[in-house]
Amino acid sequence: MIEMLITLVVLGALAAIAIPAYQGYIEQTRRSRAIADIGALSMALERFHTIKDTFPASLAELGGNLPANDPWGNPYQYLGIEVVPPPTTGEVRRDKNLNPLNSDYDLYSMGPDGQTQKQLTASKARDDIVRAGNGGYIGVASEH
């Protein structure tokens, strides 16, 4: 009986270590996938702009075999800024200094929680995967 209890304690300790490590690995993989997807979508948007001299009204106009949803199952968010008519200034995402993240278009994932806010310092936006600096940065909003 004691041997059985010791075995259960050892298995419980291993599970307590392994499960959080595995969940962290899965989350990092999803984050990396979202960054790669945003990079691919950015390239498709740039190709569209090169051909048509404007950005599309939505990601659906890009066509092709591009990801529509992020690894958490939410649609990627897109806002053309350099379009006619331009969006209102309240729709554009902003950094901690309230400066727009991009001047051409905003492209991002709402991250694991599926929620967002326009300013990156807001609590719901901290886990978003964003494109900033007109493509100079693609990564987690809290690290920008």
Image (cartoon, rainbow, N blue to C red):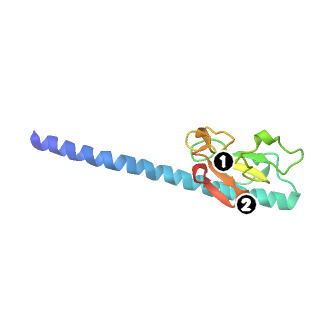
Q: Is residue 2 left or right of residue 82?
A: left
Q: Is residue 87 left or right of residue 20?
A: right
**Identity, as a three-letter code, of the amino acid under mark 1:** Lys
Q: Dot 2 corresponds to which residue?
A: 43
Quadrant hosting residue 39: bottom right
Q: Is residue 59 left or right of residue 39?
A: right
> Dot 1: within a 10 Å radius of its alpha carbon, few (fewer than 14), some, or many (20 or more) residues?
few
Secondary structure of residue under mark 2: helix
Query: Residue 133, how many percent across, how many down?
Result: 71, 57
Q: 61 or 33, which is in the foreground?
A: 33
Q: Is residue 17 left or right of residue 50?
A: left
Q: Dot 1 corresponds to which residue?
A: 96
**Identity, as a three-letter code, of the amino acid under mark 2:** Met
Query: Residue 64, how many percent across, how many down?
Result: 74, 54
Direction front: furthest residue: 97
Tell me which residue sits at (57%, 47%) in the image: 71
Tags 2 and 1 in contact by the CB under 8 Å rule? no
Q: 83 or 103, which is in the foreground?
A: 103
Q: 37 or 17, which is in the foreground?
A: 17
Image quarter of the C terminus? bottom right
Give the number of the disc on residue 54.
none
Image quarter of the N terminus? top left
